[in-house]
Image (cartoon, grey):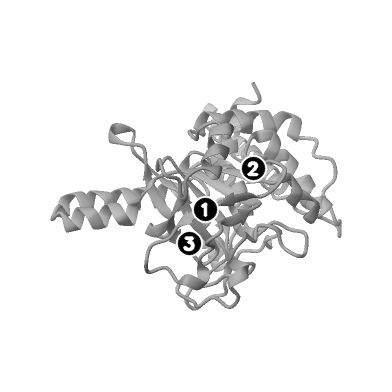
Amino acid sequence: MATSRDKRLTSDWENDQLEAVFERALTAYHRDELHGGASCVGDRILDAALAPVAREAFLDADELPPDPEVLRALDGEPMQLLGEGYHVVALVEPGHRFVVKYAKQLEPVPPLAAPQQAHEWSHDHGTRPDGSLHPAIWQHIRSFEAYGPLVVPSRIYIAESALPRLSANERRALERFRSIGIVRSLGHAPRQVHVHYPDEFPLEKRAPDGIALSVLVVQPRVTALADAIERSLRAGDVAAARELEARYREFTEQLWRCGVSHLDFSILNIGIAGTGLAARLKIFDPHIGEIEVAGAQQLRDPLVPHAPRERSIENVLRSSRDGSRWALWREWVIRGPR
């Protein structure tokens, strides 16, 4: 005889199964996964319902100045070099309100590596010869859907003159992110952004006449967690450093609970957004590429376009959900469109 407890357990199991189906379907949908040998994704019939939800969430989280103000800053006083990674160069505008990132080369280049051709550093490499956007750009485009409130919201500005260099499928994939408000127009032509370099930066990597940027990422300025910990230690405040370390551990646990399937979030990729009681840890530099795991095969970053669905390592330690968009879309599944 079925008891009320049995019915409740059955209902909970059915709800969990339904949520899992929704989650998997939304993940496949947002990753543009191809099936049956298809070369492109068909009509995006769910966008009419999903895009407005995503747009509302993004605009609520977006704290950047209006577009005209951002574009004026690009044409104004020289920006300061903030840092150079393997994939991008980061600049900060004079008011320190936001950071500008651009793809520095087609392939990863170590920050300390000597440049091979100086002219390759005078413009960005956001578009690639095969008609695709640089993966680092896609990382930032997709990061809000992947991490939701756990990431620093990014805007991506693309010059209209760069769009013909992209394939039809790539342009089509960008349309949804335009409707959400993540991808925006940089204007017709690239922006010539002037940079103030520190004295120790190699002369061969400098662009004395400015860098022609046709694809760029703009983010609010945050305090890198590694810098905050270092400052605390230099000031002799060990307790504050330990508190930041504890918050970092809690934050990475939260990432796992929310379904982000990376095995490691470097302390260098996480920052402190806001001040005082409003300060929160957020990812400002989404991980890109393959993640090395000792004694096992490499795991593909789930945000890389067309990443393989198979993930070993005990299905990513049996802890992460396959739907990396769960953090953002779970509310839609539960509450439905407004």
> Whole-Å distance between the Cαs marked 1 and 3?
37 Å
For disc 3, the marked residue is 263
- Left or right: residue 12 versus residue 162 is left
Furthest-front residue in this view: 209
Q: In the rendered structure, which disc, 3 or 2, sits on the residue that comes first in sequence?
A: 2
Q: In the rendered structure, which disc, 1 or 3, sits on the residue that comes first in sequence?
A: 1
Q: Helix, strand, or loop for circle 1? A: loop
Q: In the rendered structure, which disc, 2 or 1, sits on the residue that comes first in sequence?
A: 2
Tell me residue 44's x, y (percent).
Answer: 80, 39
The disc placed on residue 1 is none
Mark yes or no: residue 1 visible: no
Looking at the rendered image, the quarter that the N terminus falls into is top right
Tell me residue 260's x, y (percent).
Answer: 52, 51
Q: Helix, strand, or loop for circle 3? A: loop
- Counting other residues with Cα less than 10 Å from the Cα at mark 2, is it few (<14), some (14-19), or many (20 or more)? many
The disc placed on residue 194 is 1
Q: Are marks 1 and 3 in contact (CB under 8 Å)?
A: no
Q: Are marks 2 and 1 in contact (CB under 8 Å)?
A: no
Q: Are marks 3 and 2 in contact (CB under 8 Å)?
A: no
Q: Nearer the viewer, residue 202 or 33?
A: 202
- Amino acid type, label 3: Leu
Looking at the rendered image, the quarter that the C terminus falls into is top right
The disc placed on residue 23 is 2
